[in-house]
Amino acid sequence: MLMIPELIILVTALLVLMAGTMSPNSGKALAPLSMFGIAASFVALVFFSPQTGEMLGGRFVMDPVAWWFKILFLVAGILTVAMSLDMLDGRLTKQVKGMASGAEYYMVLLSTMAGMMYLCSARDLISLYVSLELTTIPLFLLTAWVRDDVRSGEAGLKYVIIGAMASGIMLYSLSLFYGLTGSTDLDVLRVSLTSSPALLAAAALLVGGIGFKLTLVPFHMWAPDVYEGAPLPITAYLSVASKGAGLVFLFHIFYRVLGGFLPDWGAMVAILATATMTFGNVVAIWQKNIKRFMAFSAISQAGYLIMGFLGKSAEGVPAMLFYLLVYIVSNLVVFAVIIFYANETGREQIEEYKGLARRHPMLSLAMMIGLFSLAGIPPLPGFVGKFFLFSVASRAEFHWLVLVAAVNSTVSLYYYLRVVKEMYVDPLAEGDEKKLRVTPVLATTISVSAIAMVAMGVLPFFYEWIHTDTIVWLRGLGL
């Protein structure tokens, strides 16, 4: 029963591929099948899969934290599939040509979801690395999906080269952990490791490799070009999937293996957080392309996210879980509007969003709510999530970091307001008076996600639910 959600995703991926070979022009029919598979996996996870247990000799373990991460990845997956309908039935379809059926697209997307779910339950270095690669390699393919688009091919090439380098660095760090203990089991590593220069080198290499996934400065260099060149639904999914997978991997190593050393490395985490949020926010101000704009926004959000690692023991985990959920929903709402607008008009420049509120008020409202949530405006969930993370840093006595993060949040409000200004204040360009029509699926996706955002902001007891489950389990580990 523990692995049923993952098996459902893998079976759905095979069914989608088989259905695509039988009917090559069934692109829109495959999306409901993919969504049904993800929904079935979600139901199995929530109602039938126990929240604790292990199998495969302890190499696959379910616990409340893994359970929550899987929920987040399934939510991101079903939203991405819903947003992909326009890509496979609009302007981009003409560029995809032989792959326009969508069978391969949905199969690869489901494969990377399976990798992230296995990553949540992995409990040794080998299964961790294999799961991470199962997550990452499909993302390389998805980035270069539009094969006749030069930008997409360039983005895929850059992503695979830098990604391979990051994987090599990370694999070398894992080999050091194995060399220091003679075991790949995380529990054995936790009790066997002692402070040494080799351990510091392994931790530094690990941060370098995972920093690539999380877009931490100075390991962020791939993000703007890859975000700009990838198909829009993939850019949206990449912005949350890569970050989520990196956070899961870092969580496993930092808390399950290096928990006893983490308080001594707080300064390193604080410096990384400061550099990441400051660089992302400052550079985002100068961006003109909406996809590059969102890339630097994602970089800055990673800086806030890792502040949760500053907590004593594992008290920052619930805050990071909540903020990751907030980021997934808020970011995908914004990208849903970007995808629709690009698919309808072919426009990707921020200045080309002039007067969008008069062409479609609902889309503009949803995008504004998403941007304000990312900026941390109350009572939206971005504010609540940042408050929890700032509280973790404050309790760890990093008050200066809280001040830096607060200043950065103010800076971010400026560039998020640029987009809102274009939509609501600037007049329509000549010839843009025609109203825009949104497909029912996309309208439902955006509406439900926007309502969920507001609910997460006004129902903070949701955090206590996460907090209670995870802290009880973490205390059982002795962290």
Image: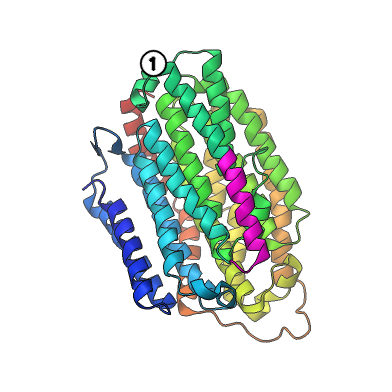
Based on the picture, tell me whether residue 151 belongs to the magenta stretch.
Answer: yes
In the depicted view, which residue is nearer to us: 282 or 142?
142
| Residue 395 image position (x, y, % from top left) | 54, 28
Report which quarter residue 151 is drawn in.
bottom right
- Say whether residue 385 is left or right of residue 75: right
**Can you say which quadrant of the picture contains the C terminus?**
top left
Q: Residue at x 58, y 60 (%)?
A: 144
164 in relation to 371, above or below = above
346 in relation to 265, above or below = below
In the depicted view, which residue is nearer to us: 171 or 330?
171
349 in relation to 374, above or below = below
Q: Residue at x 45, y 43 (%)?
A: 132
Based on the picture, tell me whether residue 404 belongs to the magenta stretch.
Answer: no
| Residue 455 image position (x, y, % from top left) | 46, 58
Residue 236 visible somewhere in the drawing: no
So how many labels did they put on this image?
1
Q: Give the colouring mode of the picture.
A: rainbow
Label 1: element kind: helix
Q: What amino acid does circle 1 point to?
A: Ser
Q: How crowded is mark 1: few (under 14 residues within 10 Å), some or many (20 or more)?
A: few
In the depicted view, which residue is nearer to us: 64 or 117?
117
Report which quarter residue 469 is drawn in.
top left
| Residue 268 image position (x, y, % from top left) | 61, 26
Residue that mark 1 sits on:
192
- Say whether residue 229 is left or right of residue 437: right
Magenta residues (range)? 147-165
Q: Which residue is drawn at 43% across and 38% down?
A: 129
15 in relation to 281, above or below = below
Residue 291 visible somewhere in the drawing: yes
